[in-house]
Amino acid sequence: MKLEAVELRRVSIPLREPWRTAHGVLYERDVLLVRALTDGAEGWGECGALSEPGYSPEWVDGAAEVLRRWLVPGVVGTDVNAEDVGPRCASIPGHQMAKAALETAVLDAELRNAGLSLAAFLGATRNRVPAGVAVGFIEPLPALLATVERFVTEGYARVKLKIAPGHDLGIVGAVRKRFPHIALQVDANGAYSPDEMDALVALDPFDLLLLEQPFPPDDLLAHAALARRARTPVCLDESIVSADSARVALALGACSVVNIKAPRVGGVLEARRIHDLCVAADVPVWCGGMLETGIGRALNVALAALPGFTLPGDLSASDRYYERDLTEPFVLDDGCLNVPTGAGIGVVPNADVLLELTTSVETITAD
Ligand code: MG
């Protein structure tokens, strides 16, 4: 497949409500889309990078720049398939989200040419996946409880709360007391230091599905120490940037669950390798999210249909974040999202919405 040109398109899509994390507040999602223009079909990929570094070192302007200057020039104008993208980008360390977006665009085009859905290509075994919802920091507590109640009523299969030092026991205890039977888990995004471990062990009575990334990404030993002390399963997110890092984390006993995000690990092919590794180790995985539009959500839903994804993912319906998605909206169907069945990622942007929300477009060719 000849990759004739690559389009980098920026889209600004308003969030229905501000998204607050320990790293800041987002009011809109500044999304970088990558479009692969080939001698056959075209393909789309969405970059997971947020507006500012925080979740990871990447940010959307940086991702656009590394694609423009180094990643796209390494593949454009050549015969390429998705398996080639990672190796061709290997001389540039890091920048997994930028690489993932490029790989996805090429893979989408390749699969559309072949008439094969991403889910089928990956080896999916389900046609619908349970949808969990992530709740950011919301104050005061009654507002948080009202938000959780809304999502439980909408049918979400699991709720995830963000926690941080000083914002943990009280929040989790109140939610658990109000909703004794919901599937509940927490995510600290690395906000704790190892000497704050007692506060995390104290979450044990709340019957949480898992405790996600309590310590900074590099500190696998602290995660292993907590995993030995706590009854709540420890899950890693930011620490797992590749199949190799997953192998090390599992060998150290740093986690017993893995959150897989294709953008964080350089693409869906590496994500599948991590899935396979975890299945072989009998470690359950689930699919995390980066507030994706329908383009990235379609990929997540296909990935989450693989057999090792035995826990509900952060796979919300489009209306969790957006009044109007870039694609046909993903909707909750009895607490689940349906896996797209069309070729490639199975969705395309709505041309009118895309035009309205686009803030810049550039097309890169080999010339
Ligand atoms: Mg997380």
Image: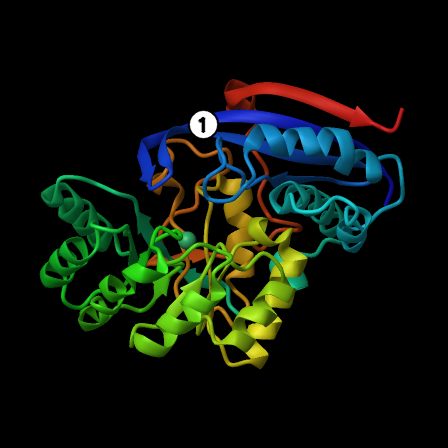
Q: Nearer the viewer, residue 123 or 231?
A: 231
Give the residue displayed 77% in from the left and 46% down from the top. 89
On the picture, is 38 further left or further right than 313?
right
On the picture, is 63 further left or further right than 137?
right
**Percent coordinates x, y for residue 157 in the rendering:** 30, 61
Image quarter in which the N terminus is found: top right
Label 1: element kind? strand
Give the residue displayed 32% in from the left and 32% down from the top. 16
The residue where tag 1 is placed is 13
Q: Nearer the viewer, residue 259 or 247?
A: 247
**Percent coordinates x, y for residue 143 in the rendering:** 14, 41
- Callout 1, which amino acid? Ile
Q: Is residue 299 visible?
A: yes
Establish whether ligand 1 lies closer than 8 Å to the Cβ of label 1.
no
Tell me: residue 287, above or below residue 74: below
**Percent coordinates x, y for residue 198 in the rendering:** 24, 66
Image quarter in which the C terminus is found: top right
Tell me: residue 357, above or below residue 339: above
On the picture, is 98 further left or further right than 126?
right
**Percent coordinates x, y for residue 256 in the rendering:** 44, 74
The way the protein has been coloured in the rendering is rainbow
Binning the other alpha carbons within 10 Å of mark 1 as few (below 14), some (14 to 19) or many (20 upward) gives many
